Image (cartoon, grey):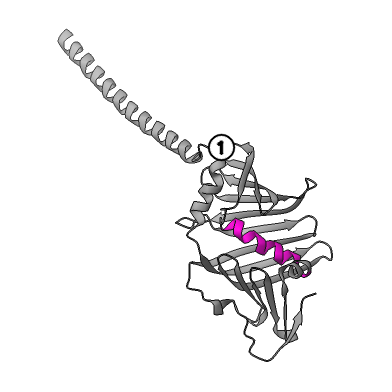
Amino acid sequence: MAIHQHYGMRKLNYQNLKSYGLFLIVLTLLLFVVISDNLRAEPLAKPEDIPNLLFSRGKNLSAFKAVMNVTTMNEVDKSRQDVKGFLLYRRPNDFRFQGLAAGGNTLFELVIKAKTFELYVPQEGKVIKGDRACFGRKFPDVAEIESLIPMVLLQWRDVRFDRVLSRDAEKLVVRITFEGRVWGATLDSRTMNLLRLVRINPRGEIDLTADFGEFHQGDYGWLPHKFEVVSPVGGWRTLAKISKIEVNPFLVEKNFQIEPTFSVKTESCR
């Protein structure tokens, strides 16, 4: 009887030891997952490296095509405009957008270059040309959104890091300077995806906000497929969804030239 009891105790101790070993293995794996997750959550040792990190991520994106659904609401006159269209972009600053009516007819075609723009309006039979300053005065909402493209596409070579404003496990907010303007940039602490941009004017007031979302997986997963831009000063809000993105397509100069089917009159922007 004592022998059987002794054997049973040895067997029980062995089972306990085996269970304890399995527990240690599981615990080690869990710790590894937690540590790895924490490492992913804080990929940067120094926040001042953020501009270089984001620039490295976006430097291979030279051009893209996309379908866009855009809704603009103006708080001043309570108007709303819904436009579906096609966007072409080529670095450093070639931009073309074709807006379509519900029936598929072209509402307008807009081409923006480094210093100039062209706007073709088929229904009016005219092309408006001028410099970007005039375009910004006549079409402030479109100009503001177009000017955000370098930031969204991580063309951050000339972005200067100023300081960290806040940081937790989910979000990192930094103050940066780009082209002489001060911005607050909110990034996902895990992925370093750009979630929000807030522009601060010289008086310390917010004059533009842009929120980004619907990030996908893959090499270009940092590209947002949805954004909302709000101008508290201008009193307008624009919501846009981007789909059917084709990264780095073959685009030539002709893609950024307006060629009306019929003869049109040309007007100078003033």
Locate residue 243 relative to residue 106 in the image: left or right.
left
Disc 1 residue type?
Ala
Disc 1: which residue: 169
Question: Within 10 Å of the Cα at label 1, are there few (<14), some (14-19), or many (20+) other Cα atoms?
Answer: few
Which residue occupies the foreground of this view, 28 or 181? 181
Q: Position of residue 162 (x, y in %)?
A: 64, 42
Q: Position of residue 10 (x, y in %)?
A: 21, 15
Residue at image location 19% in from the left, 11% down from the top: 6
- The verdict on residue 146 being magenta is yes
Which residue occupies the foreground of this view, 20 or 183? 183
Quarter of the image that includes the N terminus: top left
| Image vertical order of residue 195 relative to residue 142, above or below | above
Residue at image location 63% in from the left, 47% down from the top: 185
* Magenta range: 138-153
User: How many numbered dots are placed on residues in this image?
Assistant: 1
Q: Position of residue 106 (x, y in %)?
A: 65, 81
